[in-house]
Image (cartoon, grey):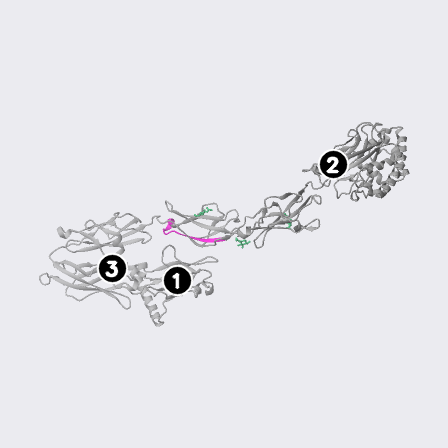
Amino acid sequence: MIPVEFAILAKTVSLLTHIVMMELRLSYFVFFLLLKHVNGDVSFSFQEEMKRGSVIGNIAKDLNLESSKLSTRNIRIDATGNRKRYCDINLSNGDLIVADRIDREELCGEKLSCVIKRDIVLENPLELHLLSLHVQDINDNSPQFKEESINMEMHESALRGARFVLEEAHDADVGHNSVQQYTLKKNDNFILSVDGNTIELVLEKELDREKQQEINLLLTALDGGSPQRSGTVVIHVTVLDANDNAPVFSQAVYKTSLPENSPVDTVVVTVSATDADEGVNGDVTYEFGHVTEDVKRVFSIDRNIGEIKVNGAIDFEAAMTYDLRIKAKDGLGLSSYTKVTVAVTDVNDNIPIIYVKSLTNPVPENVSPGSEVGIINVQDADSENNQQVRCSIRNNAPFKLVPSIKNYYSLVTTGQLDRELVSNYNITITATDEGSPPLSSSKTVQLSVADINDNPPVFEEQSYSAYVTENNKSGSTLCSVTARDPDWRQNGTVIYSLLPGEVNDAPVSSYLSVNGDTGVIHAVRSFDYEQFRSFKVHVMARDNGSPPLSSNVTVSVFISDVNDNSPQILYPAPEGNSFMTELVPKAAHGGSLVSKVIVVDADSGQNAWLSYHIVKSTDPGLFTIGLHSGEIRTQRDISESDSMKQNLVVSVKDNGQPSLSATCSMYLLISDNLAEVPELKDISYDEKNSKLTSYLIIALVSVSTFFLTFIIIILGVRFCRRRKPRLLFDGAVAIPSAYLPPNYADVDGTGTLRSAYNYDAYLTTGSRTSDFNFVSSYNDNTLPADQTLRKSPSDFAEVFGDCDSSPEVGPCTS
Ligand SMILES: *[C@@H]1O[C@H](CO)[C@@H](O)[C@H](O)[C@H]1NC(C)=O
Ligand SMILES: *[C@@H]1O[C@H](CO)[C@@H](O)[C@H](O)[C@H]1NC(C)=O
Ligand SMILES: *[C@@H]1O[C@H](CO)[C@@H](O)[C@H](O)[C@H]1NC(C)=O
């Protein structure tokens, strides 16, 4: 079977091997030698059939790696698909050890050089080295003939020198270990002629069927191994009468090609041989010569017509060529041989297979674009173009494949990941080969994104407002704030708290509290609208990440009024405490302003919107009170018949729900004359207790003084009335500042009330020019409270004298 050139080569190799073997035998156990180490590729040469665990070589040394780094770099022999690795790497010392039975004959058959190629893969960074394992033959197979005995029929007429072809022996070993020589056991008739692969019996002495009808010959085949192995066959020669011609094949070699996966019964080739003889001597039958078991499984031959058909699966990936030895035999046993070479052609029948070699999963969302998250390897068992694979990512995920070494790709990110937008990626990798039609496969890699605390909590509103009515219960709920944080678990867990601060010089925590989990804000105390109407606090939302992120929001609390303050009468002083009396000139016309009730209400709005009513009066028709101004005016001209003493009870109500009220009494004296003063006593005494006599005396003295003063005023009035007497009481009524409670007194002379109190009350009670002018004009003289009534007549004269010149006091000038 081995061509002549190979035989010469085999002899050369065998010689070399022989020398090497001598060396090896001396050094007992050195089974391998390192051939070369080029470009990071390593190759080892060693003998087949070494025991599992035997050391072939040291990878670490050859690749210049430290043994300690081997396992961290995940060094491994990469065998794709279900191909065997044959050897492993000892991670502790880098030894390459035998992992599987390595039978050269099974691996490489008749090939002279038997090389197993595997990849050595290292990660971090990814490195790939080619590992070539040169498997050396050992003489573990004996030469073998196809049959134990060969039956030959020879015509007795055969001439001396006639040649009869014998089938050669076969030895699965190669080179020197294959068949090297044949010997024929000494006999009377035949000698052996060996020329290359052709073995022939040469007739040395003519046969004589009559003398010897049957001859047995013993043929021995010897290989060149050490120790030498041999095989024998018995040649059983039957001496016949005739048959002169052996069959002759039409071709010495048949060459054909066959696509893989050809169906059973596909005709591969038809061989034909002719035999010049006639009848039985010319009937040619065909059969396989010495062929491997493989060939017998895959092909069949038709005995009669020499048609070779497919009988099993043809797989290019399993065998690329088949050599078939075909024997043609005529009816009487003369035979000849031919060879059929079947080249199997590749069909694109293997889809590319995608292997995920490593994957970082989950990937933190803050990896920078371009980071490697995985290594992908693609394999296609076909050859040539059918093996060229392109790889791509189908969906528009932010990942791409970067070609690395050979069929390796790095899976890298192309953009920033954001777990809050996409937390899981299904990355579909598609591999397509360049066959026709192309085959493709895809694999989906699931990658999840791990959270990083990159989002602060965000409040749902820009700011919050809470409205609460005063006098609330402490602990009542004001409002709630909500912040959202899209991060995961504790990175997205929001905790609320009040930022420290002060409201009216007290810490905010004494006003409000916030529930850390729910964001519900409670009042800690009861609020008083009259103290403050609104305040602001800052609430912080913080997540539980490390480090935590936070944001804050302003919460404004608005306190609304409740009608909890009743009107407070400033003038006249509340009933029973004083004996205020207004003088009404007898000449007063209808509509003249007589007096004014001055009331304040600490509430605001409707709760301080006051209305005045006369609830009781001596003469109901005589006086009216302005519903909202509190001004008491005559309803008609005073007549002589009107009683001098008039008594009014005024009630003041605010407009709250429910409304609150206050009442006061007002004593009016219709008189121009001071002489009538003593009668005042009756008015004030109407309902007084006699025990107050002493106070009354003091009061009477005061009143007398007042009347004395008043007479002077009247005189002044008369004087003025000569020009325009009626208007005196029309424009304004003097309200002595003494009637204002201390807090209401103007201390800085601006004529306004102290700002701490709202003076809506004044504005609602006062009329246009109203009170402030008077307060201000009295303040010019800054009277002490208790001296008001004792002001000297000249002082009053001054006031009224001003009337003439001052445009401020309308009645006098206009
Ligand atoms: C990814 O695939 C899994 C299972 O096939 C599926 O449950 C999941 O919803 C997919 N995710 C996306 C983002 O498509
Ligand atoms: C929260 O974020 C940090 C980094 O900011 C990360 O280390 C941690 O794993 C995250 N926690 C969760 C539950 O995802
Ligand atoms: C509150 O938030 C503002 C911006 O919204 C920030 O400038 C300020 O520093 C924060 N205050 C606190 C105490 O965190």
Residue segment shown in magenta: 372-386
Q: Left or right of 366: which side holds 408?
A: left
Task: Answer few, some or many: residues within 10 Å of disc 2's Cα (few below 14, many 20 plus, some between 14 and 19).
Answer: many
CA distance separating discs 3 and 1: 41 Å
Tag 1 residue: 88
Q: Left or right of 358: which side holds 142?
A: left
Residue 433 visible somewhere in the drawing:
no
Percent across and percent down for residue 45 are: 37, 64
Give the foreground label among 2 and 3.
Answer: 2
Amino acid type, callout 3: Asn
Tag 3 residue: 197
Q: Secondary structure at mark 1?
A: strand
- In the rendered image, the vertical position of residue 733 relative to residue 445, given as above or below: above
CA distance separating discs 2 and 3: 142 Å
CA distance separating discs 1 and 2: 108 Å
Q: Is residue 149 magenta?
A: no
- Mark closer to the chain start, 3 or 1: 1
Percent across and percent down for residue 658 are: 67, 38
Tag 2 residue: 652
Residue occupying the far left of the picture: 210
Give the foreground label among 1 and 2.
Answer: 2
Q: Secondary structure at mark 2?
A: strand
Amino acid type, callout 2: Val
- Mark closer to the chain start, 1 or 2: 1
Task: Answer few, some or many: residues within 10 Å of disc 1's Cα (few below 14, many 20 plus, some between 14 and 19).
Answer: some
Viewer-proximal residue among 751 and 130: 751
Percent across and percent down for residue 743 are: 78, 44
Task: Answer few, some or many: residues within 10 Å of disc 3's Cα (few below 14, many 20 plus, some between 14 and 19).
Answer: some
Please identify the quadrant where the C terminus is shown: top right
Give the foreground label among 3 and 1.
Answer: 1
Disc 3 to disc 1: CB gap under 8 Å: no
